Amino acid sequence: MSSAPGFRGDPSRANPEQLFVAALSACQALTYLFLAAKNGIRVAGYTDDAGGRLGVVDGRMRMARVTLRRNRIIGNSVSTPVEVAPQLVFTGDAVAAR
């Protein structure tokens, strides 16, 4: 691991902010897939182009925003604002989430 490149970190290594966004994205994916399976919905595909923005919030450097391309269930667990921008594609009897 390393700090973010803007803080003299190695861009080839993961930084804590990237891992935070990845954890939120993974939790969203698992929740989505669980709910789909529970309701008998066959999932043809799943992608998430999650992103985060580091910034000064209340005078402190912290995650200012995270964007997920999915439902907002995990957003209730963190204090960082989580923006949701879902895209669903229906193909026959399956749904592909992007």
Image: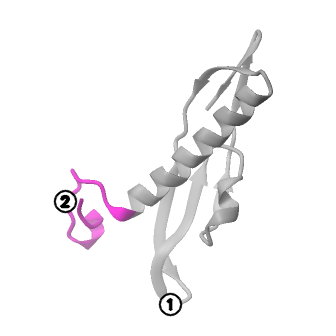
Looking at the image, is mark 2 or mark 1 earlier in the sequence?
Answer: 2
- Region of the chain picked out in magenta, as a range: 1-16
* 93 on left or right of 83: right
Quadrant of residue 39 within the rendered picture: top right
Taking depth in this image into account, of 53 and 21 the one nearest to the observer is: 21
* 32 on left or right of 56: right
Taking depth in this image into account, of 71 and 10 the one nearest to the observer is: 71
Q: Residue at x 61, y 32 (%)?
A: 98
Residue 8 sits inside the magenta stretch: yes
| Residue ID for mark 1 | 59
- Specify the principal SS of the magenta part: loop
Secondary element type, mark 1: loop
Q: Residue at x 46, y 60 (%)?
A: 20
Query: Which amino acid, by three-letter code, is at mark 2?
Result: Asp
| Residue ID for mark 2 | 10
Taking depth in this image into account, of 86 and 32 the one nearest to the observer is: 32
Q: Residue at x 71, y 23 (%)?
A: 89
Which residue is at the far right? 39
* 5 on left or right of 37: left
Please, is residue 37 above or below residue 24 in the view? above
Question: In the rendering, at what x and y percent does residue 50 appear?
Answer: 52, 47
- Badge 2: how crowded within 10 Å, few (<14), some, or many (20+)? some
Question: In the rendering, at what x and y percent does residue 27 appear?
Answer: 57, 48
Q: How is the image coloured?
A: one colour
Residue 3 sits inside the magenta stretch: yes
